[in-house]
Image (cartoon, rainbow, N blue to C red):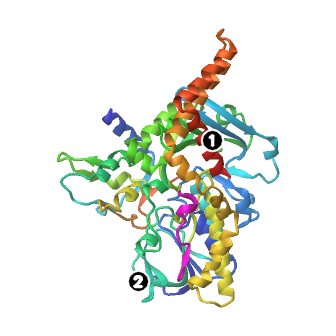
């Protein structure tokens, strides 16, 4: 079920245009050993499924497919779990329709 | 980068920012507008419905060349059950008027057009530039901005923060708080393309006519939320949104919710055979009147989504954005015309003018509504829609049960799901919040 969902989200993101700022992720997850409740929430709430668990059970982000909605900022910035910035000007998602 | 000094810097080129920049530039102010997208619109997401009246107050003849999709002649509210919906439709030929009241638009295209008007009015519009910091003097007065293009500070008498719902600058400078999960909804949306004739047949419209479906009920799984279908010329915008705090609590994923909504037997036939060309997500301010932050200060004002100006009950966001942008622009022009400094006390004129407009009056009217709907989401978004759909089925299905017994069954289903006291209490609270 989980893989089916993951596949579908990637499919959705595939429709979008992006200009990825290689090597400059605009969102960073604070290093941790066990993820906080806020971080675990991001696994399901992020609409682009950018957050995933790694083998060690830590939450990681791959921001390439980020649609810049800011949901993770609302949840994870006040708790200090993530550091959130906009991508540099011109980079990130480029909506054709919006 | 830019050595000149400006009368005003506008951060952001959405509806609020474009309205503010246009209003000030067309009155002769020297305006710099900074936008992080490759053009105005490339980062902006909305359903989207444009309200003509508010647009006319900014650009009266916008209909002549603005990219408009369809004018709306029909509004459908659907209360969703698991495999059913109970609908309230309003359609009128009155909406086929010379100057229609509401249009669907595609934001990337509309905003690009609006931005061209801002440039024509004389503003300097610089895109692909993210503002990273507000520059404040020793007394905390905002005197300019810094961008990611380097080149130090750019100075202006006033900075208009039109940075959107997740704007960083105001929050980082301590001018307002970051919205709480209870104060914003996360909406996801897809653009489904299909031939024009197919849209016209499926939605019973012709030419440039359009229809809107807004749906609430079991589709949000008990969360405070809403789904929508908007007809554009050659595509349909389909989306669903729920409060971020509800997503947090339920562990539901927005894309799963969208897929389920699209597969609902009342929705699926409307989308059959379409080609999806984009998937977007955006936050919507939902806090209402009680979440509006401080709107002005020394050398700054905040407008649009960044100021939580959204009427969630009537689903009006962009018109509050453009109206607050226009009013901020007018207020700044007045202060400037009197050759007064952009102090907090002078800029309070913006708030005074906004208080006198429909923007704050409407938000005040519904000030208790967000709380009521958010706390009671299970009842309003799950139990009642289920009960209503069950009652409708009971009413229309002819199976030999005497009608009196049917009525009793319906009443019983309501009272057993929610006591008489609960039902009356909810009706009373809803009526009071509406008033």
Q: Secondary structure at mark 1?
A: helix
Mark 2 — residue?
A: B152
Whether residues under marks 2 and 1 lie with C-beta atoms below 8 angstroms apart, the answer is no
Mark 1 — residue?
A: B427
Residue at horizontal 66 percent and vertical 32 percent from the top: B202
* Label total for image: 2
Within 10 Å of the Cα at label 1, are there few (<14), some (14-19), or many (20+) other Cα atoms?
A: few
Residue B241, relative to residue B153: is it above or below? above
User: Which image quarter holds the N terminus of chain B?
Assistant: bottom left
Q: Nearer the viewer, residue B188 or B297?
A: B297
| Residues in magenta, as a range | B287-300
The image quarter containing residue B411 is top right
Residue B159, horizontal then vertical, whole percent: 53, 78
* One can see residue B314 in this view: no
Residue B287, horizontal then vertical, whole percent: 53, 57
Residue at horizontal 66 percent and vertical 65 percent from the top: B323
The image quarter containing residue B254 is top left
């Amino acid at each position: 079920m989980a893989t089916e969902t993951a596949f579908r989200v990637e499919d959705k993101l595939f429709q979008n245009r992006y200009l990825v700022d290689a090597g400059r992720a605009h969102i960073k997850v604070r290093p941790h050993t066990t993820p906080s409740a806020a971080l675990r929430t991001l696994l399901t709430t992020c609409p682009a499924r950018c957050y995933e668990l790694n083998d060690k059970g830590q939450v990681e982000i791959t921001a390439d497919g980020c649609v810049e909605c800011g949901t993770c900022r609302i949840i994870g910035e006040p708790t200090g779990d993530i550091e959130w910035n906009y991508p540099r000007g011109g980079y990130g998602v480029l909506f054709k329709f919006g | 980068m830019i050595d000149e000094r400006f009368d005003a810097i506008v951060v952001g080129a959405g509806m609020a920012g474009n309205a503010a920049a246009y209003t000030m530039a067309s009155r002769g102010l020297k305006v710099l507008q900074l936008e992080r997208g490759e053009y105005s619109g490339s980062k902006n997401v909305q359903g989207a419905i444009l309200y003509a009246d508010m647009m006319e107050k900014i650009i009266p003849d916008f209909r002549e060349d603005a990219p408009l999709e369809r004018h709306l002649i029909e509004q459908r509210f659907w209360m969703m059950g698991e495999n059913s919906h109970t609908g309230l439709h309003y359609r009128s030929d009155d909406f086929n008027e010379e100057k229609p009241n509401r249009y669907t638009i595609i934001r990337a295209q509309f905003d690009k057009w609006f931005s061209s008007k801002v440039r024509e009015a004389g503003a300097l519009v610089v895109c692909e530039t993210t503002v990273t910091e507000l520059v404040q003097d020793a007394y905390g007065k905002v005197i300019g901005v810094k961008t990611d293009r380097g080149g130090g500070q750019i100075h202006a008498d006033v900075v208009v923060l039109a940075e959107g719902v997740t704007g960083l600058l105001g929050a980082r400078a301590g001018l307002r708080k970051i919205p709480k999960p209870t104060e914003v909804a996360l909406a996801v949306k897809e653009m489904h393309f299909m031939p024009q004739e197919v849209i016209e047949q499926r939605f019973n419209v012709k030419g440039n006519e359009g229809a809107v479906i807004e749906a609430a009920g079991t589709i949000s799984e008990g969360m405070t939320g809403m789904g929508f279908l908007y007809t554009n010329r050659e595509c349909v915008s389909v989306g669903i949104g729920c409060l971020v705090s509800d997503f947090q609590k339920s562990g539901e994923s927005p894309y799963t919710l969208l897929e389920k909504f699209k597969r609902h037997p009342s929705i699926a036939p409307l989308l059959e055979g379409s080609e999806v060309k984009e998937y977007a997500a955006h936050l919507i301010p939902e806090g209402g009147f009680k979440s509006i932050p401080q709107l002005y200060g020394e050398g700054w004002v905040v407008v649009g989504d960044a100021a939580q100006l959204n009427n969630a009950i009537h689903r009006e966001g962009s018109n509050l954005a453009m109206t607050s942008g226009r009013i901020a622009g007018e207020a700044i022009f007045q202060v400037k015309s009197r050759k007064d400094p952009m102090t907090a006390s002078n800029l309070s004129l913006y708030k005074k003018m906004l208080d006198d407009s429909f923007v704050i009056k409407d938000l005040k009217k519904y000030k208790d509504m967000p709380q009521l709907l958010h706390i009671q989401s299970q009842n309003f978004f799950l139990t009642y829609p289920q009960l209503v759909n069950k009652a409708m089925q009971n009413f229309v299905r002819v199976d030999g049960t005497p009608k009196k017994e049917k009525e009793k069954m319906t009443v019983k289903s309501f009272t057993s799901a929610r006591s008489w006291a609960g039902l009356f209490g909810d009706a009373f609270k809803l009526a009071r919040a509406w008033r």
